[in-house]
Image (spheres, helix red, strand yellow):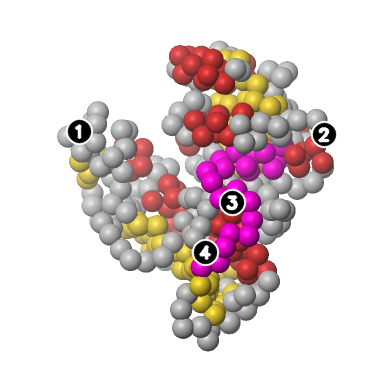
Amino acid sequence: MAKQRIGIAGIGKISGIYLDNLTGMFGKRVTLTAVTDLIAERAEKAAADYHVRAVKSIGDLVKDPEVDIVLNLTQPQYHFEVALAALKAGKHVYNEKPLCVKREEAAELLKTAAAKKVRVGGAPDTFLGAGIQTCRKLIDEGWIGQPLSATAFVMNHGHEHWHPAPEFYYQTGGGPMFDMGPYYLTALVNLLGPAVRVCGSAKTGIKTRTITSEPLNGKTIKVEVPTHIAGILDFASGAVGTIIASFEVYSHTLPFIEIYGTEGTLRVPDPNTFGGPVYVKRFRAEEWSEIPLLKNYPENSRGLGITDMAEAIVKGKPHRASGELAFHVLDLMHGIHDASATGKYYEPKSSCPRPEPLKD
């Protein structure tokens, strides 16, 4: 089977694990050929470390005849511009999360990809890891009966205490929902299917933040986005989900995700990871039972989504971390904010197939 060739745009913090895995864990399934970054030294170092080519610009990367798929690891505000250029050049594209900042941009990417007969994929791919795939198997096999409802909680006190450049998280395109929501909502769609209606409430409780990490220690940030969001999702399957995403919580004792069914409860592991633990409590059980991971990829396997996409391209099959899934998640996040602003339910304009389970 011919291997798809990948070029990376953006050699920032997240690129390290992609570089490691695409040349290591997935190196027999895909080929990394080129990298580029606005800071040439970053690209040159990555090229030397991983024995690939450094190209001068994104324009050069998307025109490179030895690149089939552009892995877009640029900052979110550039996701649309870079991906659109790649699609117009006839390349497949896989974006880090979120797919784009705006829904209109995401819709244009999918439309352009269809016209060019190429594919769009998008992070996160953690739902393909052993932990959440084990949860998917348990749900599909009826361990908790029919899923009726779900809860998801992603809450902390923001990034200004540890991140070297945290301003973005409090500007347009940032906030707790757009930062971590893709992991949680992607996991929920994988487990329960797409949503058909959302509502929510969003607020900004702390108007300014002071950075205490280096190198910007002491700098004040004006908060431009909601930093505490509570959303409700009605899934097409009939289940009802609740999600809270907050930068205003110092500590809590709530689970990452739980699914409540007619026969019991499933506790889902951190959707920002690929592993476990996974717990089930059947309705007559006195204690929770930890379920051994029944699937592959319990370790940090970022790059699994684009690898699955690359193989699906060759085989002519659908890929799991699809552009439609990433667009639907983006639509849901915006929809929760829209519902808060208007005081009305929002009915998503998007949908997606429930991704097929990852085969062993």
The secondary structure type at the circle numbered 3 is loop
Upstream in sequence: badge 4 or badge 2: 2
Q: Nearer the viewer, mark 4 or mark 1?
A: 4
Task: Decide if residue 256 is on the left or right side of residue 57.
Answer: left
The secondary structure type at the circle numbered 2 is loop
Specify the label residue 1 is tagged with: 2
Upstream in sequence: badge 2 or badge 1: 2
Q: Amino acid at mark 4?
A: Val
Q: Position of residue 129 (x, y in %)?
A: 59, 51
Q: Amino acid at mark 2?
A: Met
Q: Is there a contact, CB below 8 Å, between mark 4 and mark 2?
A: no
Residues packed near mark 3 inside 10 Å, few (<14), some (14 to 19) or many (20 plus): many
Upstream in sequence: badge 3 or badge 2: 2
- Rounded to the nearest angstrom, the CA distance separating label 4 from label 1 is 39 Å
Position of 304 relative to 329 (above/below): above
Position of 11 relative to 96 (above/below): above
The answer to whether any part of residue 165 appears in the image is: yes
Q: Position of residue 223 (x, y in %)?
A: 28, 45
Specify the label residue 129 is tagged with: 3
What is the span of residues highlighted in magenta in the rendered image? 290-310
Upstream in sequence: badge 4 or badge 1: 1
Q: Is there a contact, CB below 8 Å, between mark 3 and mark 1?
A: no
Residue at 48%, 50% (x, y): give it.
272
Residue at mark 1: 217
Q: Position of residue 111 (x, y in %)?
A: 69, 41
